[in-house]
Image: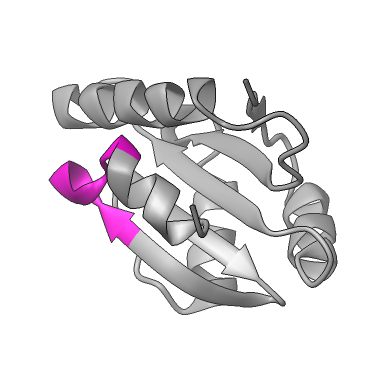
Amino acid sequence: MSDYFRLQSISEIDELIEKSGETPVLFFKHSLTCPISRAALRQYESFLADRPEGDLTTYTLIEIQNARELSSDLAERTGVRHESPQALFVRGGEVAWHASHWSIQSEALAEAVGD
């Protein structure tokens, strides 16, 4: 099982995007007050529970209410308009896939990261 970590600073986003050439990153933006976001988070956590051992992808969480500036920064850097919930898979510094709202399903996440 893989786990995610909560992003706390813009410098962490910088570092992860830079390292995404070696290790892909899945960013997940979550609203603490939205029922759709809560359902998407459950899908994200279900997807993570099924990750194979040795998976090198970095999995993150941005809680919108606690880190609005991080969410905005990620949108600006990637060119993908902010939505919540939202998942962005970054490889080689570029967004390879993104989805929002009900499109965030564990199967879609697995397909996006190349399972």
**Which residue is found at the position 43% from the left and 59% from the top?**
112
> Could you say which quadrant of the image residue 101 lies in?
top left
- Quadrant assignment for the N terminus: top right
As drawn, is 37 to the left or to the right of 94? left
Q: Give the image location of residue 47, x and y in percent.
A: 43, 31
Residue 65 appears anywhere in the view: yes
Q: Is residue 73 above or below residue 70?
A: below
Instruction: Out of 114 and 2, give the one closest to the viewer.
Output: 114
**Considering only vertical position in the picture, is 1 above or below 95?**
above
Give the image's coloring scheme: one colour
- In front of the other: 51 or 17: 51
Say whether residue 102 is magenta.
yes
The answer to which quarter of the image holds residue 33 is top left
Q: Residue at x 39, y 47 (%)?
A: 109
Residue 92, located in which quarter of the rendered image?
Answer: bottom right
Decide if residue 64 is on the left or right side of residue 91. left
Q: Number of numbered discs present?
A: 0
Q: Give the percent coordinates (x, y) of residue 107.
A: 30, 43
Q: Residue at x 46, y 79 (%)?
A: 79
Residue at 34%, 69% (x, y): give it: 81
- Please, is residue 93 above or below residue 64 in the view? below
Please report the bounds of the magenta region as a residue range.
99-106
Q: Position of residue 54 (x, y in %)?
A: 78, 36
- Residue 82 visible here: no
Residue 42 spot, x, y in % from top left:
32, 21
Q: Is residue 35 magenta?
A: no
Whether 73 is drawn above or below 47: the answer is below
